[in-house]
Amino acid sequence: MSATTPVSGPEQLAAVLDAAGPNLRPLIERAERRLQEVAASHGRELGRHSSNTLAAGGKRLRPMLVFISAGEADSEDLVRAAAAVELLHMATLVHDDVLDRAPLRRGRATVFADGGTAAATATGDLLFSRAFAELTATGHADAVRALADATSALARGELMQREDAWSADVSRARYLERCELKTARLFEACCRLGALLGAPGAAAADALGEFGVRIGIAFQIFDDVLDVAGPVERTGKPRGTDLLDGTVTLPLIVARERDLSLLEVRVADAGEAEAVCDRIAATGALEDSRREALDHVARAKERLTALDLGARTRQALALVADGVVERYS
């Protein structure tokens, strides 16, 4: 299959696994076992909440990026790094659910809904601390630094998002900055970790990190498109969840440029959120937002041309890039 052929869902995952070579699937399985061991190792209640959180995870895109960016290398340090990025990602989701008082994530009850604020906060803290424990065990200071930088960026992005709630003054540039901080910098860290701990080495870390940033921004833009357009049976959350939280995303920014009545819009319940989603879609904002995401994918793939990567690695990364904007298509 061509590296530029867009695929989605299970088909996309299978294509990436085939392109990356025989090492990827066993590495993902090892990382999954490690995640389960970590989740179950801190007593019954925290272990249950951690295990449920991990079970609600997606396709393990971030660990996959670590492994693919490593260029077919295979080591226990890479498994630890892959587990670390997923643990950090899951920690942020648990904490987000506390802030948003979210009842569901991917169709499952959140830790917040199941155990309350205290349990969810403790679970997120546990996952966060274990992420750094896993990575510290590699003994690679630059790897720990990369994840620490991503964590700091994530917190800054979250604060920006809270500050911008329902603001009519959020520009496209500020939105993209928030996407980079809150989402893309962890993608960058995944690619850096793969390079640092794998075959490409430190010389390739910057370019692979830039690749990660671009696909991370594309991922977040398309996630925001799905919040307006995606059916609940596929996304695992109701339409307009971001609207209920007051989060100003690119589809809303673009729609406001075309329908000024949306500048002062507020929603109080799911029914109102659905109605505003329909108004946003009617402006053509979803198509424009998707084009923006595709532009970042194209820029990500351009970064690959400057890297001395094996054919398998290049094709697998290109497929991942295509896949972040082909979810549920």
Image: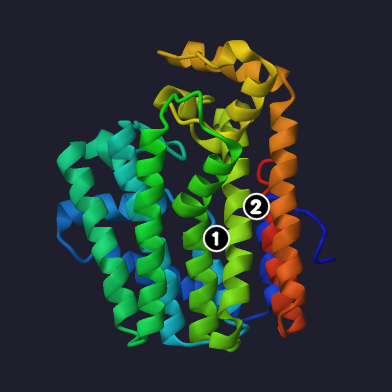
Q: Quadrant of residue 126?
A: bottom left
The type of residue carrying mark 1 is: Leu
Image quadrant in which the N terminus is located = bottom right
Real-space Cα distance between discs 2 and 1? 9 Å
Residue of label 2: 324
Q: Is residue 234 visible?
A: no
Q: Is residue 59 above or below residue 228?
A: below
Q: Quick check: 10 left or right of 168? A: right
Residue neighbourhood size for the residue with mark 1, other residues' Cα within 10 Å, grouped as few (<14), some (14–19), many (≥20): some
Q: Is residue 296 visible?
A: yes
Image quadrant in which the C terminus is located = top right
Indicate the position of residue 268 as horizontal and vertical percent values: 40, 13
Indicate the position of residue 122 as horizontal and vertical percent values: 18, 51
The type of residue carrying mark 2 is: Val
Instruction: Give the residue drawn at x 85%, y 66%.
Output: 2
Q: Disc 2 vs disc 1: Cβ atoms closer than 8 Å?
A: yes
Q: Is residue 325 above or below residue 265?
A: below
Indicate the position of residue 301 as horizontal and vertical percent values: 74, 65
